[in-house]
Image (cartoon, rainbow, N blue to C red):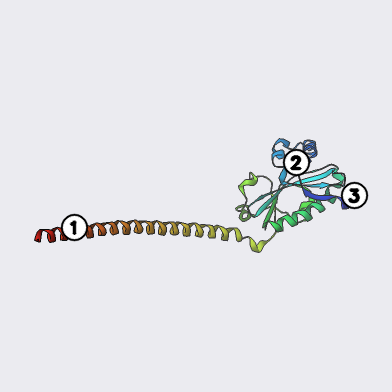
């Protein structure tokens, strides 16, 4: 198999039989992964044979690499190089700030994955599971690590603005109802006044 001519793409439902075969081969929880197959990138040759796959789970601005499998493990690092090109593209497209993994192959350490600090662990997405496991992390855009906090502040500000707007609109609706009631009362007052004047005028004759 020539890794140069392998195509790296997102997995499709047609890839499931081969993926399940590889997951079973590595004793991975294939029943669970089958439901999440769209997270996987696959290395496919010209005949449609899958030579490797890796999962990329995204939660907000962070990603998790997981469940890598290879048909021949002597090709693992060669295919990881190709997968890494794809991972970089996906990370850029999704504006990811950090990548997490529990995969222990030296390849990933060579690309900068390292044990997280206590401060970094505070940003660990709960969607990725138990943070008490053996995790390593790669910071992709350190200068953007505050983006999540800024977006949360913006969301809170937007929520408060929506509440103020809704309160103002409710007050406006109440004032409109009050104005309508006052207008009706005024109209009735005018009618009563005119009736009174007409009655006096008729009585005076």
Q: Is disc 1 in contact with disc 2, using a CB cutoff of under 8 Å?
A: no
Mark 3 vs mark 2, foreground winner is: 2
Looking at the rendered structure, the secondary structure element under dot 2 is helix
In the rendered image, residue 81, in percent from the top left (x then y), is placed at 82, 53
Q: Identify which residue, 160 or 137, lies in the foreground.
A: 160
* Image quarter in which the C terminus is found: bottom left
Q: Identify which residue, 87 or 117, lies in the foreground.
A: 87
Q: Residues within 10 Å of mark 1 (few under 14, many from 20)?
A: few
In the image, farthest residue toward the front: 205
Q: Residue 70, labelled with which disc?
A: none
Residue to which mark 3 is pinned: 2
In the rendered image, residue 78, in percent from the top left (x then y), is placed at 85, 51
Q: CA distance from mark 3 to mark 1?
A: 102 Å
In the rendered image, residue 108, in percent from the top left (x then y), is placed at 77, 52
Residue to which mark 2 is pinned: 13
Q: Residues within 10 Å of mark 2 (few under 14, many from 20)?
A: few
Q: Residue 195, labelled with which disc?
A: 1
Q: Residue at x 9, y 61 (%)?
A: 204
Q: CA distance from mark 1 to mark 2?
A: 82 Å
Mark 3 vs mark 1, foreground winner is: 1
């Amino acid at each position: 198999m020539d890794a140069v001519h392998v195509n790296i793409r997102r997995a499709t439902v047609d890839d499931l039989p081969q993926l399940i075969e590889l997951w079973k081969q590595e004793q991975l929880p294939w029943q669970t992964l089958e439901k999440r197959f769209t997270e996987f990138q696959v290395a496919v040759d010209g005949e449609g044979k899958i030579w490797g796959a890796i999962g990329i789970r995204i939660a907000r601005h962070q990603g998790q690499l997981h469940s890598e499998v290879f048909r021949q493990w002597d090709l693992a690092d060669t295919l990881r190089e190709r997968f890494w090109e794809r991972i970089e593209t996906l990370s850029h497209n999704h504006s990811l700030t950090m990548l997490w993994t529990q995969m222990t192959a030296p390849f990933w350490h060579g690309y900068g994955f390292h044990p997280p600090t206590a401060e970094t662990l505070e940003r660990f997405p709960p969607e990725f599971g138990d943070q008490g496991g053996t995790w390593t992390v790669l910071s992709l855009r350190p200068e953007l690590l505050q983006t999540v906090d800024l977006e949360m502040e913006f969301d809170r500000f937007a929520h408060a603005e929506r509440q103020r707007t809704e309160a103002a609109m409710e007050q406006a609706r109440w004032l409109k109802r009050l104005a309508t009631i006052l207008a009706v009362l005024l109209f009735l007052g005018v009618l009563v006044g005119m009736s009174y004047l007409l009655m006096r005028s008729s009585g005076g004759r």
